[in-house]
Image (cartoon, rainbow, N blue to C red):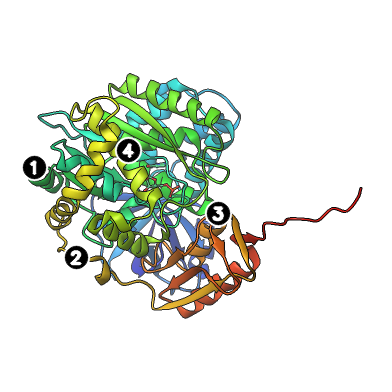
Amino acid sequence: MLFLKVRLLDIDLLDLVLINPEDIKASQYFPGDRVVLIYKNKEEIGTIYSSTLVNRGEIGITKELAKSLKVKEGELITIKHADKPRSLAYIKKKMDKNKLSKEEIFLIVDEMVNNKLTNIEISAFVTSLYINGMDMDEIEALTIRMAETGEMVEWESLVFDVHSIGGVPGNKYALLTVPIVASAGLKIPKTSSRAITSAAGTADVMEVLTRVDLSIEEIKNVVKETNGCLVWGGALNLAPADDITINVERPLGIDPKPLLLSSVMAKKLAMGVSKLLIDIPIGREVKVKDEKEGNKLAREFIELGERLNITTECALTYGNQPIGRAIGPALEAKEALETLEDPYKGANSLVDKATHLAGILLEMGGIAPAGEGKEVAEELLFRKAHDKFMDIIVAQGGKEVRSEEIEVGKYFIDIVSPKDGYVIELSNNKITKIAKEAGAPNDKKAGVYLNVKVGDKVEKGDLLFTIYSSSEDRLKNAIKLARTLYPIKVEGILIKRIVRF
Ligand SMILES: O=P(O)(O)OC[C@H]1O[C@H](OP(=O)(O)O)[C@H](O)[C@@H]1O
Ligand SMILES: O=c1cc[nH]c(=O)[nH]1
């Protein structure tokens, strides 16, 4: 046992524990050792790193860890050796391509949620799923345990939801779809994640406009008042393992299929959703490459839904280009608002996607006859969705806002076409990389605004896109990246003249 004085670290790495090298030398511990940190009746797991950032007699822990332990700076905590978590053997079993039993999966989730696994171990689990996958029995067990380890919400009537598997830039559809559906009288308590592979998840975009970290009680009140909400699942102790795995997936830029399925469905199971629509964007540079793969994933979602008693339908949607023109939290919030304020001005891809998805939900809820949902959704978009969205924003703790009031990055640069021609290619991946380099999603005001889409005619010097950032340095890096990546290709109609072979 070692007694050390707490020093708080402003670092976002939950299990990090810093100890002065001299203290380490004089103790029985080594860098990399897993230790239990004990303060009063609370215990947390950490991993020792040797660092002169802390003085002798001190222990550096993150603010988040201190919060879990309920310990303050300067107070003494005790550390002792931690046993290896039992679930490590099962993570290794999956790394070795073996099927896991329900009990083994339950233990992995339990130990993850109870902070017994380090980020390295969780990342090994995530990577093993990326490489070796899981069958439907394993995915069902993973989903159920992810939901059960958090709060489970119950409703007095049927509730609906829509969820995208993401991957396509500018995917702000939910800010239109949810108010359309809510304005038709269906209850739609939408939970979202933050960005996983993209430059802005729905929760990141919605947070520009209002609070997304509502408690279950608050959500119930918002839905009672407005029929809908758009909140962040991670704030709710709702399927808590979801946010833990997403935090590992994000830096790796991967979304392994078993986790994709369980992450979406665990949030819905915990939220008590009865009827669900899943959006599966299809395209060269999104998570699902073609219709065949999309059909397969849709079958898996529907089967998992049956096992969980959630009626699930899927929509395969076009994902070869960004949805709308804005990519990045504030830019997307602004574009969604502009479209709600005047749907005539909205980008076709955004209006079309949002109303198609809303239309399917309206048909699933018996509000619109089969085949007429989209038309009903379009009418609601023009007549009611904007006011309903304002009601939701206010009920969640924000205030009514106009699109022109949304601030975007004060540093920006316009990228223009180097020649006359047509836009023949617009790369999702490259646009996402540039928006992230500019700071999105953490810098809410960073991102990319597209002035053109594939097929548009341009002249030399015409604006192709604008990059925004709150930081001059980040903008410079994003410009450098844009100049090497060429996310938008412009070619003349004549590709090549061939005289003879
Ligand atoms: O594009 P990436 O970041 O990989 O996917 C994550 C996004 O996709 C889902 O979208 P929604 O909640 O249906 O809007 C998640 O909730 C999250 O916002
Ligand atoms: O919520 C989501 C969406 C996409 N992928 C996930 O893992 N979770």
Residue named by callout 4 = 357
Residue named by callout 2 = 401
**Badge 3 amino acid:** Gly
Spatial separation of the CA atoms under disc 3 and disc 1: 45 Å
- Dot placed on the residue nearer the N-terminal end, 2 or 1: 1
Residue named by callout 1 = 224
Which disc is residue 455 wearing? 3
Q: Residue furthest right?
A: 501
* Ligand 1 lies under 8 Å from the Cβ of mark 1: no
Q: In the image, is 100 to the left or to the right of 333?
A: right
Q: Quadrant of residue 73?
A: bottom left
How crowded is the residue under tag 4: few (<14 C-alpha within 10 Å), some, or many (20+)? many
**Badge 2 amino acid:** Val
**Badge 4 amino acid:** Leu
- Dot placed on the residue nearer the N-terminal end, 3 or 1: 1
- Dot placed on the residue nearer the N-terminal end, 4 or 2: 4
